[in-house]
Every structure is written in C-alpha cells, then in structure tokens.
Amino acid sequence: MVPVFSKVAVIGLGTMGAGIVEVFAKADFPVYAVDGSTELAERGRGFVTKSLERAVSKGKLSEADRDATLERITFTAELSDLADADLVIEAVPERMEIKHSIFTALDDIVRPDAILASNTSSLSLTEVAAGTRHPERVVGMHFFNPAPVLQLVEVITTVLLADDVADAIRDLALKLGKKPVVVGDRAGFVANALLIPYLARAIALYQTGKVSRVDLDNACKVGIGLPMGPLTLSDLVGLDVVHEVCEVMYAATKRASDASPSLLRQLVLAKRLGRKTGQGFYDYSADAGAEEDAGTDAMTASAAIVGKGELATQLAGAFAKAGVTVTAIDDPETDVADLAGSPLVVLVGGAEAECANCDSGECDVEGKDADSACCSGAAPGNWFSDVAEVLDARTVVLAADEASEFAVAGVLDDDVALLPLRVHQETKHGQVAEFGVSLGTTDEQAAMVRATLTAAGFVPVAGPARPGLVVDSLLFQHVGDAVAMVDAGYATPQDVDTAMTAGCGYPRGLFAILDDLGADVVADGLLEQGSVDPTVVPNPLLVEHAVRDLPFLD
Ligand code: CAA
C-alpha cells in the first residue's frame, strides 16, 4: 500500500530537527516535535519560534501565520505520543547506538506500516535499518542546513527498502516545496560526499598557515561565487559534523583528502564547534574583534603594465584609478630600459606576440614543444625577456598568465620576485586577484601587492605559488570528485548539480561549471596539481570528455 502522510513526527530538536519541524508545520502538517526532556523540547520550541519571528520581522510571514504554524506543532518529551504518526524523522546526534535505541523504541510504538526516516548525514542507513523490526520501512530523508531555506532533500534507499517508499518520500518532499534526489546508501550520499572533502582540503590548506582564513574564504566565495567560504560554511554546518562525515568518508574511501585534518580534530576536541558554540574557525562572540583590514598604506606609487589584451587594459585602468602612476607598454618596440628599478611590473598575456615567427607558424626556436607550432613567446630576445633583463631585486614582477611566467622564467635574475597572478571572473561578490608567494617572497613584497590590488578594487587572495594557486586547486579537485562520482555510477551529472545548487546554495552546479571551463582545462589543471601532489589525478571519465571535447550536460 502506498504510504499516506497525515501526521509527522521529528525526533531531536537541534538545528536540523527544529528546521525540519518548521518546514513541515509551514506546509500545513500537524507535527510532533520530540526531544529527550521537557527542557530540550522547550529549547526546540525556542529555535522554531525564533526562526518564525525572523520571518515575521522580514515581512515574509504574517503574525497570524506564525501563530497557526506554532499551533500545528506539539512539543513533547514522550516518544509514546507518536503512536498515530505516519512518518517519524529522527535528527538526533550521529551515533549509531542512539539511532538504534530510538528506532528500537519506535518499533513498539508506531504502527507497523508507519515510515521511519533518518536525517543522518554520515551513518550507514542500511545499518540503521537492519537493526529494526521492519527494515523495509526505513528510509533516509536528508535535509540541508538551514532546512527552511535550502531545497535539497536526499532520499536514501537501501537494499532492504520496500519498493514504494522512496517514491512516496520523494512525492512528499515535492509537496514540501523541496527538490528531492533519490540515491543509494553510500558514504556521504551526493552532497556531503562532494562538499565535505572540499571543506577538508580547504581546512588542510588553512592549517599549513600559508593562506589566511579570510583569503581562503574569499577565494571560494568571491573567486568561485559560492554562497560562503569553506571555513565560514564549516562553522555553520558544525565542526563536529564536518569531522564525523570526514571519518565516515575516509573509512569508506581511504583517500587522504577525505581524512579529517588535524586542526579540525583539535577544534572538535576543544569543543569549538562553530556557530553553535560561539567559536570555530571564527569567533562569533559579541566581543570578538573585527577582522583586521590590511589597508592600502603599503601600495606601490607606480607600476608598469607590460602586455596586450583586455586584462592589461583592465589592470592599467584599475591601478590608475587607485592613484598608481601607471606606465602601460603594449608595443614590443618600446624601449624598456626605463623599467629598471620599477617597484612593480605586471606582465600580461603579451608573450605570444614577441616572437614574430610564432604568428606565421614558422617559429624554429630550439627546444620548443615538439607538438606546438610556436614557442609560446619563449623565443630568446623576445619582448618580455628584454624586460626581464633590465629588472633587478628592486622590482616585484607579477605574471598574469602562464605564458608570461614561462617567457621570463630563467631570464630574470634569481633575486627578482616573480609571483604568479590570476585575475578571476567577476562574481556577484566581487573579483578576486590571486597571487602566489614562494620562499623568496618577503612580507613587504606580499603586503605591497595585496595593498595595490585592494586599492585597485580587487579582492586579493595570497597563497602558495603552486599549480592552481588556491581557487583552481580547490575548484578543480571539487569538480574532479564530482566526475569520479558519476564515473562510479552513483549519480548523474544532473543529480550532482541539483544537489549542489539546491543543497549548498551554489549558483551553478559543478557540471555546469565544468562544462564552462572545459574538461581539457580541468584535466590539465589536475595533472599540473598532481605534479606537486601525487594524490591528485584526473578521473578517466574526465580525460575521455577532454579528449573527445564532450560536455557533461546536454
Ligand atoms: N533559518 C531560516 N531562514 C534563514 C536562515 C535560517 N537559519 N538563515 C538564512 N535564512 C534566510 C534569510 O532569512 C534570507 O531570506 P530572504 O532572502 O528571503 O530574506 C535568506 O535565507 C538569505 O539569508 P541571508 O541574507 O541572511 O544570508 P545569505 O544570503 O548569506 O544566505 C545562507 C545564508 C542561506 C545560509 C547561504 O549563505 C547558503 O546557502 N550557504 C550555504 C549553506 C550550505 O551549504 N548548507 C549545506 C551544508 S551541508 C548540510 O547541511 C548537510 C549535512 O549533512 C552536513
């Protein structure tokens, strides 16, 4: 018989449970909201009331609707009250023994045909189900934080589940205005299996001390356009939850990047769990000081922009607007002797132009890439190497693309700071200009570059000068994980994109991003990243798409 849901119960009134109660009550369902004691049930009432008040104060809910919503909820500490529930969703802490004791108790309370759902984000649903008297009615119904806002519901099936239950839960999710994705029982399901390793990589990078927390968050929020940076998001999700999902993921995959970073473990042991305890990667207490602003005091007074193209024009304009005296050189015939002693020289996408033979396909530079028609601007005596020859340790050189970097590497004196610069596409949060620092970069040089980029209107991100810097190393590996999930036959590209947009608020799904970038660009980027971290390897399906130039989405 197809289940019908008239009366719903939610057990566990923490952040997630209270959010789920609100979702059902707002959709006109009578809801039992249960926690382990009267105090905890009252605390849950407080969470729901506060959230509804917030909606009222924003004009999204009338006071009458708030009262009607609250009236539909029965807050209780008694499981025995649930005898007439058609659907019970547990959202208690992620410990198997707690889940088992609740489901065992429910076996004696609810009707045999009532559906028991778990909001678990990390435990094996099959193990939860197998411990009950009727495993065929145990299903996963996984909501995302904040549950009233995010639309994804992962409906998790097991090999024990009765045929019609997943469909009934999917239809229910649709009735709640959510976007369901039905998948099997695998560590992390879809969204967490992609989100949590990305968060863990970001945390692992942060713990090296090579990137500040604000830069790391800006790299993803501003650089990629995600709703929050990974450290802010970890604090929202709860560091204990991130840690638990890492443990489950690592146990299942044994992939180094899934392991819980030691800093995360330490914060969990220290009970700094993020927003819910007032401190995590950030301090949420009322007296926490604001993040220090580096200011623009250290910016350069003058800079040379050498090169051609849109980016060269943008940088020259933005620097000039910030009060920097700009020398823009876009003609290879210009005498560059005057650049000696410049504090800042930016080389931009002009490298190909210096070898006249490249354009005609007749370049015969010794040692050029055998498969390539040209030397990519590496020709001896080229424009950029003329610039490189006049510079000394007084100058910081920013190379805005690989070709520019390649054109001067080996020509510049060893004591000249050559830093990679990548200006990313503007997103709704701003535009990231990311630069790489290496062992020879001094604090003063990094501060000068940061201050100049800030004054020019960019959001600066400084990280290690390694392939992909911060933005592309996190993004490409995140996208690579999504391809591996599809290659494993667990989810479709469409499922993944629904999960990440509806569950994590991404403005575009990972496959939409991948198709935009091109599979070849991501595969090449991962290969490069693999040159410094052998655990990073492009998935074979990604390589197939790259070779055949095929998008993942229609
Ligand atoms: N309850 C109810 N509504 C909330 C809310 C909450 N806790 N938090 C925010 N909102 C509402 C706000 O009222 C606001 O609504 P309006 O636009 O209609 O006014 C809207 O959400 C946007 O909020 P803000 O303007 O305050 O802030 P924002 O634009 O930065 O959005 C956010 C906040 C919705 C949390 C957004 O940043 C986001 O989507 N972040 C990503 C969160 C995410 O990835 N969650 C999934 C984590 S993984 C998980 O939960 C699964 C697991 O098992 C671990």
Image (tube, rainbow, N blue to C red):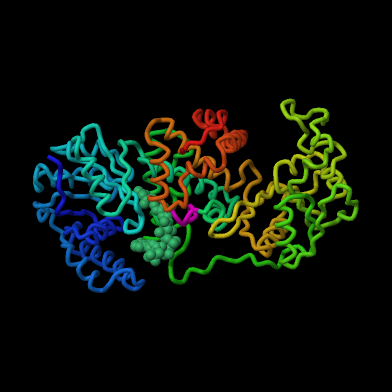
Magenta: main secondary structure: helix
Q: Residue at x 83, y 36 (%)?
A: 379
Percent position of residue 371, x then y = 72, 26
The quadrant of the image that shows the N terminus is top left
Q: Is residue 14 left or right of residue 267?
A: left
Relative to residue 377, is residue 230 depicted above or below? Answer: below
Between residues 315 and 46, which one lies in front from this camera angle?
315
Where on the picture, by quarter, is residue 97? top left
Between residues 240 and 376, which one lies in front from this camera angle?
376
Relative to residue 193, is residue 38 depicted above or below? Answer: below
Residue 277 visible, this orientation: no
Percent position of residue 388, x then y = 83, 46
Q: Residue at x 60, y 34 (%)?
A: 524
Relative to residue 14, is residue 522 depicted above or below? Answer: above
In the rendered image, residue 131 lying in the magenta stretch gets the answer: no
Quadrant containing ligand 1 reads bottom left
Q: Which range is magenta?
A: 226-235
Percent position of residue 272, x then y = 41, 57
Q: Residue at x 26, y 45 (%)?
A: 170
Residue 290 visible, this orientation: yes
